[in-house]
Amino acid sequence: MNSVLAYIDGNTDRYLQELGDLLAIPSVSTDTGRFPDIVRCSEWLADHMRGIGLHNVRTMPTPGHPVVYAEWLGAPGKPTVLIYGHYDVQPPEPLELWTSPPFQATIRGDDLFARGSSDDKGQTFIHLKAVEAYLKTQGALPVNVKFLIEGEEEIGSEHLEAFVREHAALLGADVVLISDSSMFAKGVPSICYGLRGLAYMQIDVTGPSRDLHSGSYGGSVLNPIQALTEIIAQLHDKNGRVTVKGFYDDVRKLSAKERKAYKKLPWSDAKYARDLGVRGLYGEKGFTTLERLWARPTLECNGIWGGFTGEGAKTVLPSRASAKVSMRLVPDQSSAKAARMFERHIKRISPKGVQVRVRSLHGGEPVITSIDSAGVRAAITALERGFGKKPLYQRDGGSIPIVVQFKKLLKIETVLLGFGLPDENAHAPDEFLHLPNFFGGIRTVAHFFEILPGLSRKPKA
Ligand code: BES
Ligand code: MN
Ligand code: MN
């Protein structure tokens, strides 16, 4: 183990340079024009995996973006760890808000800035570098590993479920390990045991068949922007609760034990509000901020457009208006059911005089993972060794759609070992990765590989 840790310490500059090369590829999954970069990124990873000594490395086609697979199975009788990550990233726009170019990794202080640095190329790279440290110093790992790195996570992992189903035998393992979430705070490592689900919707409102002069026609027909904003304004009541009929029906109640545990976490609403630049917080009455973020479902309007938005003034009564609305879901809500309830509700409250179309864009199911599996116990000790601190238990508000499928299709529990920070600007300009967490993460994963075999009784293979 000491030579593994020494190898990590001795190669920090090269590790950062390589991560910079990975981050230079603009693998934006939602942008079809970037498909060649998606392919290039998958091939870069595959080449890199071959270089560090992984076996059976391949990029595997799907109807969408390729999946990168690799393995090292030289530890018969020992547990197998399936490591999942994603190499696709969110769009970098608006570009003018970046301090340094998004695809040119730049270190300022202790942080490395680039799109994907935290979500999720940087965190995925942590695992590759831990594996490399073993294979280059020992020629072996204490466990078997399989890598499944996908390129569609940021657009809903549309083709991954079928891929996992089809390749269930190839992907068989004792535990899934994912670093695609955050620690509780800087210097406060954590194990995440819950993620929210998602139902992403679009509303399109059409009024008159064409744009109209607002003087000649204003007063005669309902403006679709007015109709749309009135619909959206009705989706929350004065207590911050979502008004969609049936929305809360399947929500699992927070146990008294969990509420108590949340209250013990080091948290300040005032500091949180100050960090976000808001004068006060908002949300469903009767729940604390962490409860609302982690264990309560929510509904947000993500974007809204229509009519004239250019410079100056144009007196127009527009023909159309649209909005994107997403719902974050918690156990035991279902994404398809939430989408259906939403559509029905919007139709019910839509005013006459406009046509309203509701579509579901994508979704994912919420998940709670086991907190006493061998994998979690190994992760706790590994974090203690890697960061010198006992981790906290937390849930998170974001979504990783495939986690539920690992459980359903492969019958494997997932360990969510996040090395990001909540304020690393994921999905926003100036995304960064805190470098002490990058290297602490590599050390933690190296410890995890060593600790796991002693804790898991019955490996599958
Ligand atoms: N890494 C995030 C998910 C995440 C964020 C987990 C914060 C825990 C804390 C992931 O890349 C992501 O952004 N997922 C999308 C899911 C979607 C597009 C289906 C999300 O949560 O919006
Ligand atoms: Mn991610
Ligand atoms: Mn993301």
Image: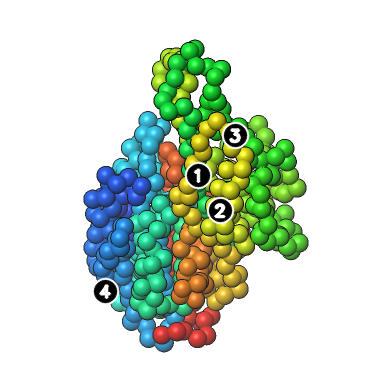
Total residue callouts: 4
**Colour mode?**
rainbow
Q: Residue 92, position in %: x, y?
A: 37, 40
Residue pictured at 31% horizontal, 57% vertical = 64
Q: Which residue is mark 1?
A: 358
Image vertical order of residue 229 relative to residue 39, above or below: above
Residue identified by numbered label 3:
351
- The answer to whether mark 3 is within 8 Å of ligand 1 is no
Residue 250 left/right relative to 140: right
Mark 3 residue element: loop
**Local crowd at mark 2 within 10 Å, few (<14), some, or many (≥20)?**
some
**Closer to the N terminus: mark 3 or mark 1?**
3
Name the one closer to the observer, 152 or 440.
152
Distance between mark 4 and mark 1 Cα atoms: 45 Å
| Rendered image: mark on residue 56 | 4
Residue 455, image x and y in percent? 53, 80
